[in-house]
Amino acid sequence: MQKFERANFEVKEYIESDHYGKFVIEPLERGFGTTIGNALRRVLLSSLPGAAVYSIKIDGVYHEFTSIPGVEEDVTTIVLNIKDLIMIVSDDDAYTLRISAKGPKVVTAADIDCPTNVEILNKDLVIATLEQGGVLDMEMKCRNGRGYVSADANKSLYQGSSQGIGT
């Protein structure tokens, strides 16, 4: 029987920086490095702070598994497109973003009406394509956060107002 070799956890190099750190864990059995590295990567990615949309309301839409007359994309696709928004929210308050568009038109992130504390970085992101006579009136709420937040955890944000699509 092979003897188990205990890993020697050591911080080999530390550089005074918010964006860099190097850690060496050795010796490890074959394949353990990939397993530990993947777990560490997932933990670090789930801890990154950022801003995101956490609620969407579209006029005339009551659930995400429907379509909007005059809009090429279904609601699920529109929601997925909105998840690709890259934004900066300058403080920890929640903000309301709005889109009001009439077709024919390709609705992009540049069409979103934002308060002064919110900046959208990828303004060329396509959100929906409106045909002749198509109308898209949408309200989104965004805020800063960290990691994944479930819909149940967001319920406290809806007190006193109607909930968004699929919440």
Image: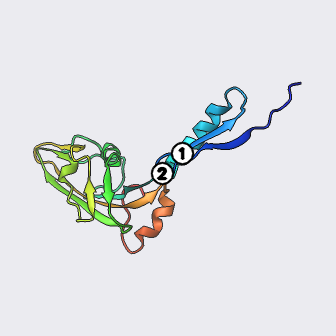
Image-based side of 56 in relation to 10, left or right: left
Residues tagged 1 and 2 counted as in contact (Cβ below 8 A) = yes
Q: Which mark is residue 154?
A: none
Query: Residue under circle 1?
Result: 21
Identify which residue is drawn at 27% across, 65% down. 117
Front residue of this view, candidates 60 and 157: 157
Residue 91's x, y, as percent? 35, 66
Residue 40's quadrant in the figure?
top right
Q: Quadrant of the N terminus?
A: top right
The residue positioned farthest toward the bottom in the image shown: 160
Query: Please, is residue 157 above or below residue 38 in the view?
Result: below
Residue tagged by mark 2? Answer: 17
Quarter-of-image position of residue 125 = top left
Q: Kindly identify the amino acid type of the residue bearing the numbered disc 1.
A: Gly
Disc 2 element: loop
> Which colour assignment does the render follow?
rainbow
- In the image, 117 versus 114, the foreground residue is 117
Q: For the residues marked 1 and 2, what is the alpha-carbon distance in whole angstroms? A: 8 Å
Residue 109 locus on image (x, y percent): 22, 49
Q: At label 2, which amino acid type do we have?
A: Ser
In the displayed structure image, the side of residue 154 where residue 122 appears, left or right = left
Query: SS for tag 1?
Result: loop
